[in-house]
Amino acid sequence: MVNNTVDPKPCVQTSDWPEEGLESVRQCPVCGSETRSRLHEGLTDRVFFCAPGRWTLYQCEKCHSAYLDPRPTSETYHIAYQRYYTHTAPKRLATAELKPVRRCIRALVNDYRNSRYGGHLLPASPFGRFAILALPNLRREIDRGLRHLPFVWPGARLLDVGFGSGLFLEMARDLGWTVVGVDPDPIAVETAQLRGLDVQQGGIEALADQVASFNVITLNHVIEHVHEPRKTIELAFTLLKPGGMLFLETPNIESAGHLEFGKDCLSLDPPRHLMLFTWASLESLLREAGFDRIKPCPCFNAYKGIAGSSRAVRQGKDYQSSKIITMNDRVKSFFLSANIYFNQRLSEFITLVAYKPN
């Protein structure tokens, strides 16, 4: 790592990305500090293999967040999403399409979802809530998938920013939420509209006039993609009703996966990930926006999956179909699970909820 106070010109970037489509980032987008160190240089898109360019990632010496400099402008950013995973995400199968064993599993899961989140999903086994409670790993996975929503009530409104495949919006709607979604990707918007979802193209700023309109806002793996994370958090605060909840999940730059794999870590994903947070820097950003009661969510240990995908990235293979998980990964994941339970600093993702004061 090369330390600099106020860093000079960033490392040379590729000419493949349109020169007029790059912008300089001289200050940390989180804390505004200009003191930084060069963390990784020569990064390329080895995740979806569709974004041109070589990228440099800097780490702020003050808040320890990391950010690209230069980075794509908002006008050319779409170039990096030509093969994004949400374009080919599978749709949720109807219960009748499932094989008998999977149908039974869905009935058990639906009963847990109904008891925990207030839905009326069918089919539902009366033993599901007890069976799932006895399987803590599965329970954490279900809760993470539903983003730790509160118990639904009539008229409750939810906004999903960057809804991607739209699967979460469908699940929330089925539970009884009135759902709204925004996403800058026209393909994602068109697909979601065909499913009957109330969505529109754009970012959270597209709904800036809907002050205090939502009970819940979710940003699931979104904040690392936006050019102005501070403004995004502040606008989410404005759009929430008093007492409303914000759910956030984003990669952790201090994770065990990044410490192990460095520039090959899947979570870096340049140039789509414009910046990466630490637990402390994200919590600080939320408090400065006005949120209180910031609570970490029960941690899902994703190290094994990140390690397997990062090893595929290192070898130039497809991270989804060629995941390489070793016995060492499994052993390390086991010990990390215990460590993360007490100290989430090394977790692969920062997952938390924050509330707007009443």
Image (cartoon, grey):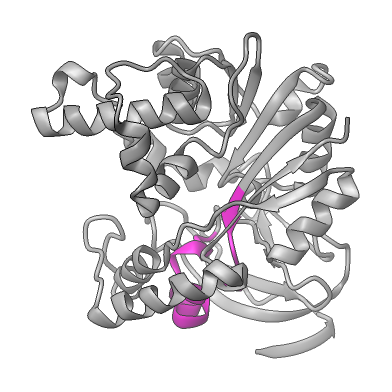
Please state the horizontal and vertical placement of residue 43, each as a whole percent of the image: 51, 71
273 relative position to 278: left or right: left
298 relative position to 88: left or right: right
Quadrant containing the C terminus in the rendered view: top right
Placement of 213 over or under 46, stated as above or below = above
Of 34 and 354, which appears nearest the observer? 354
Tell me what residue is drawn at x 37 percent, y 54 percent: 137
- Please report the bounds of the magenta region as a residue range: 249-270
Please state the horizontal and vertical placement of residue 227, each as a whole percent of the image: 72, 48
Tell me what residue is drawn at x 87 percent, y 72 percent: 34
> Most extreme residue toward the left, as rendered?
100
Q: Quadrant of residue 196?
A: top left
Q: Quadrant of residue 61?
A: bottom right
26 relative position to 321: left or right: right
Of 186 and 97, which appears nearest the observer? 97
Q: Is residue 104 visible?
A: yes
Please state the horizontal and vertical placement of residue 348, each as a whole percent of the image: 51, 65
Tell me what residue is drawn at x 23 percent, y 80 percent: 327
Of 35 and 258, which appears nearest the observer? 258
Placement of 298 over or under 15, stated as above or below = above
Q: Is residue 187 visible?
A: no
Residue 258 drawn in magenta: yes
Please state the horizontal and vertical placement of residue 133, each as a whole percent of the image: 39, 44
Placement of 196 over or under 285, stated as above or below = above
Tell me what residue is drawn at x 43 percent, y 74 percent: 264
213 relative position to 47: left or right: right
Placement of 196 over or under 265, stated as above or below = above
Residue 266 drawn in magenta: yes
Quadrant containing the N terminus in the rendered view: bottom right
